[in-house]
Image: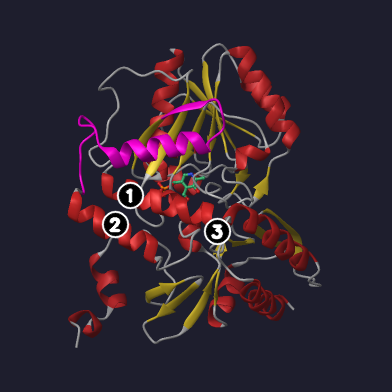
């Protein structure tokens, strides 16, 4: 017997790890495609994708092979040395991103990408203030946390990094009023994920873009969750406007930790001022290249668009007194209830569907983009049953 099969993961994790995650009472051991399996062999349809990581699905052989081969070739290569795999990924990402984005900084997570963007904004503009949105989520390291909305996250760790201001999302007038001569950057999600799956208006982002142009403010889009096909285009900003910096992570490397900030020529930082030991390591770069190849070959952004439209339409046709609103873009969907969503998330899990919360009353669906229409129909039946 494999020694890992004889342990009790719940007991060990509860005993030995810091208890910072609200846990669900299952042990996940395997994933394939859009399916996850627990230690009892129970199958689940994954509508969480590890909060937007697994856009290409679980257990992809293309990524596994790339990682295996790259590890045997060279797994780490500090940024002071050139490396062909990192070079290829940098070129690839820039070629796939909006025209004005010309350079990339590699890191290891979403929060790190946001941290880097804030530092780059200060260094590039010589100004200190950053404006973020209420209900925005940008991660939990100190800089990112200051931009993340929510007392529950910030309160245990005050004082916050100074210079952060929050304004209501999707409200141009309030943002305009908050801008002053010290404003270095504005950071926004195009679809607020943790904040309840809220899609901003095109006109709002156009107004913000114009304001930033007029005032010499850098516009940062946090696409850590919306990136890599999730909303129906490779990057959500393709449906809105171009940023000066684009923060990426989660699904970038097919499940391997990696983050990146794509930057316009307005971004300039001194040599040595911001670096990362693991940032751009060839192992993660190889995984990212393999994952991008899958996204392109299988046309996953288009698939997210068409299947997302079907999913959204079907969700909107569910007749339930419990539903307040259904919203979303591509395969990033939210069902806002008139009551707490937690019990429904649990009920769905018991019927074989894993979903997420986005705030207390919103059920968030982020399935792998390779999910089939048949699997979506099974999820819809489970939702009808749970919310009926
Ligand atoms: C929009 C957004 N930004 C940043 C982050 C932080 O990413 P990480 O958990 O990799 O630090 C998240 C994580 O959920 C996110 O959704």
Residue bearing the label numbered 3: 298
Residue 67: assigned label = 2
Q: Quadrant of the C terminus?
A: bottom right
Residue 176 % position (x, y): 67, 21
Which residue lies at the image location 68% right of the left edge and 59% below the top edge?
Answer: 308
Residue 168 location, quadrant: top right
Q: Is residue 46 above or below residue 187?
A: below
Q: Please tell me whether mark 3 sits on a helix, a strand or a loop.
A: loop
- Name the residue located 73 percent from the left edge and 36 percent from the top edge: 202
How packed mark 2 is, by other alpha carbons closer than 10 Å (few <14, some 14-19, many 20 or more), is many
Q: Is residue 246 left or right of residue 311?
A: left
- Crowd tier of the residue under label 3, counting other residues whose Cα lies within 10 Å: few below 14, some 14–19, many 20 or above: some
Question: Mark on residue 286?
Answer: 1
- On whether ligand 1 comes within 8 Å of the CB at mark 2, the answer is no
The residue tagged with tag 2: helix, strand or loop? helix
First reached walking from the N terminus: tag 1 or tag 2? 2
Q: Can you tell which quarter of the image residue 1 is in?
A: bottom left
Q: Which residues are magenta?
A: 75-103
Which of pointers 3 and 2 indicates the residue nearer the eye?
3
Horizontal and vertical percent position of residue 48: 52, 64
């Amino acid at each position: 017997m494999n020694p890992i099969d004889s342990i009790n993961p719940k007991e060990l994790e509860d005993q030995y790890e810091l208890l910072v995650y609200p846990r669900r009472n299952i042990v996940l051991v395997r994933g394939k495609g859009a399916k996850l399996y627990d230690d009892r062999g129970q199958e689940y349809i994954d509508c969480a994708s590890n909060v937007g990581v697994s856009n290409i699905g679980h257990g992809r052989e293309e990524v596994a092979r790339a990682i295996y081969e790259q590890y045997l070739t060279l797994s780490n290569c500090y940024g002071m040395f050139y490396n062909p795999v990192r070079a290829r990924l940098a070129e690839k990402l820039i070629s796939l991103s909006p025209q004005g984005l010309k350079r990339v900084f590699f890191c290891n997570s979403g929060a790190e990408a946001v941290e880097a963007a804030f530092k780059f904004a200060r260094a590039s503009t010589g100004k200190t203030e950053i404006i973020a949105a209420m209900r925005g989520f940008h991660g939990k390291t100190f800089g990112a946390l200051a931009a993340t909305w929510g007392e529950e996250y910030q309160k245990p760790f005050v004082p916050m990094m100074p210079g952060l201001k929050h304004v209501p999302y999707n409200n141009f007038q309030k943002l305009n009023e908050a801008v002053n001569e010290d404003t270095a950057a504005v950071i926004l999600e195009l679809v607020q994920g943790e904040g309840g799956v809220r899609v901003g208006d095109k006109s709002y982002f156009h107004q913000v873009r114009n304001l930033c142009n007029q005032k010499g403010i850098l516009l940062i889009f946090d696409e850590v969750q919306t990136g890599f096909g999730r909303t129906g285009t490779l990057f959500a900003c393709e449906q809105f406007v171009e940023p000066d910096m684009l923060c990426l992570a989660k699904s970038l490397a097919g499940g391997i930790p990696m983050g990146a900030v794509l930057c316009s020529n307005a971004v300039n930082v001194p040599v040595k001022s911001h670096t990362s030991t693991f940032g751009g390591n060839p192992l993660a770069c190889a995984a990212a290249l393999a994952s991008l190849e899958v996204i392109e070959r299988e046309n996953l952004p288009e698939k997210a668009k068409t299947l997302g439209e079907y999913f959204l339409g079907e969700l909107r046709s569910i007749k339930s007194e419990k539903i307040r609103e259904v919203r979303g873009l591509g395969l990033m969907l939210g069902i806002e209830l008139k009551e707490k969503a937690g019990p429904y998330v649990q009920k769905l899990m018991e019927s074989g569907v894993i979903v997420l919360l986005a705030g207390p009353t919103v059920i968030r669906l982020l399935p792998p983009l390779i999910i089939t229409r048949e699997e979506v129909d099974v999820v819809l039946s489970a939702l009808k049953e749970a919310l009926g």
